[in-house]
Image (tube, rainbow, N blue to C red):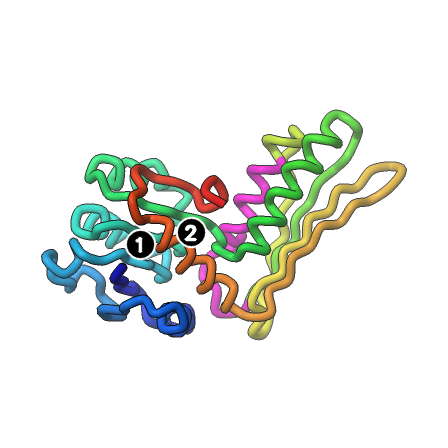
């Protein structure tokens, strides 16, 4: 497998480190993915961790030119159908997630199960997400995803609170409060390394894959 990284910031460097650790070839790390030659792109999986504006501008190029794509950028949920359709129409497999951390995906699975168990029993859900001051979208894509899971499983739309402070990699806390008790589920990332590991795991999953999939579906 060959990989091209779209977005060469902190996440891009961590993904590069993870690729090297696994012996996976990194063809290039690009700040402008649309400058990639189509004949090169066709042999590569694109791992994209950029910005909401960048993915809006670039998703069609990625879908039409790359062998496959892993999209870790958040903040594009309002054009989700357009992005999915672009990859489906191009026949390019794509794996996306609001958070590629294996731990966060475990949290989401736990939230779904707890919500199903408590549905109709008077629990009020809420979500708090804390991230570094450089994060451009709020609420986080992870918080939005967890909110959808709660709404579907518990039948109640949770309030989401976003906090931006320091260099916090990411903390997501889910609270379900009732008149008799309170349940708290929490995930704290120590660094962005977990996102990089999950993104590379997803890139490996694209081999032989067809269609568009959320990472959690494939775990």
Q: Is residue 147 magenta?
A: yes
Marks 1 & 2, CB-CB < 8 Å contact: yes
| Label tally | 2
Left or right placement of residue 120 versus residue 217 in this view: right
Residue 55 placed where, x, y %? 31, 54
Q: Residue at x 51, y 55 (%)?
A: 138
Q: Which residues are magenta?
A: 132-150
Left or right placement of residue 60 versus residue 195 in this view: left
Q: Under tag 1, what secondary structure?
A: helix
Label 2, on which residue?
Answer: 75
- In the rendered image, the residue lying farthest to the front is 23
Residue 219 placed where, x, y %? 49, 45
Give the quadrant of residue 15.
bottom left
Q: Nearer the viewer, residue 82 or 188?
A: 188
Looking at the picture, does residue 11 appear above or below residue 128? below
Q: Residue at x 22, y 58 (%)?
A: 44
Q: How far apart in space, not on screen, are marks 1 and 2 (Cα)?
A: 9 Å
Looking at the picture, does residue 174 appear above or below residue 134? above
Give the position of the N terminus as an image quadrant. Answer: bottom left
Q: Under tag 2, what secondary structure?
A: loop
Looking at the picture, does residue 59 appear above or below residue 210? below
Image disc number at residue 55: 1
Task: Rate crowding at label 2 as few (under 14), some (14 to 19) or many (20 or more) other CA atoms within 10 Å.
Answer: many
- N-term-proximal mark, 1 vs 2: 1
């Amino acid at each position: 497998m060959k990989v091209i990284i779209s977005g060469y910031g902190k996440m891009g460097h961590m993904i590069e480190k993870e690729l090297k650790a696994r012996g996976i070839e990194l063809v290039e790390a690009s700040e402008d993915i649309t400058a990639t030659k189509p004949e090169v792109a066709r042999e590569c999986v694109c791992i994209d961790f950029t910005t909401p504006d960048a993915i809006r501008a670039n998703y069609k190029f990625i879908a039409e030119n790359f062998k496959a794509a892993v999209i870790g950028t958040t903040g594009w949920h309002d054009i989700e159908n357009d992005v999915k359709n672009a990859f489906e129409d191009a026949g390019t497999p794509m794996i996306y997630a609001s958070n590629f951390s294996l731990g966060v995906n475990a949290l989401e699975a736990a939230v779904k199960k707890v919500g199903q168990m408590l549905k109709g029993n008077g629990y009020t859900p809420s979500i708090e997400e804390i991230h570094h001051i450089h994060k451009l979208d709020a609420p986080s894509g992870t918080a939005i995803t967890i909110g959808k899971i709660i709404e579907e499983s518990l039948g109640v739309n949770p309030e989401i609170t976003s906090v931006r402070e320091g260099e916090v990699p990411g903390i997501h806390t889910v609270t379900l409060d009732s008149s008799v008790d309170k349940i708290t589920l929490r995930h704290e990332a120590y660094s962005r390394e977990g996102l990089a590991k999950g993104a590379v795991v997803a890139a490996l999953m694209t081999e032989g894959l067809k269609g568009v999939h959320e990472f959690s579906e494939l775990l």
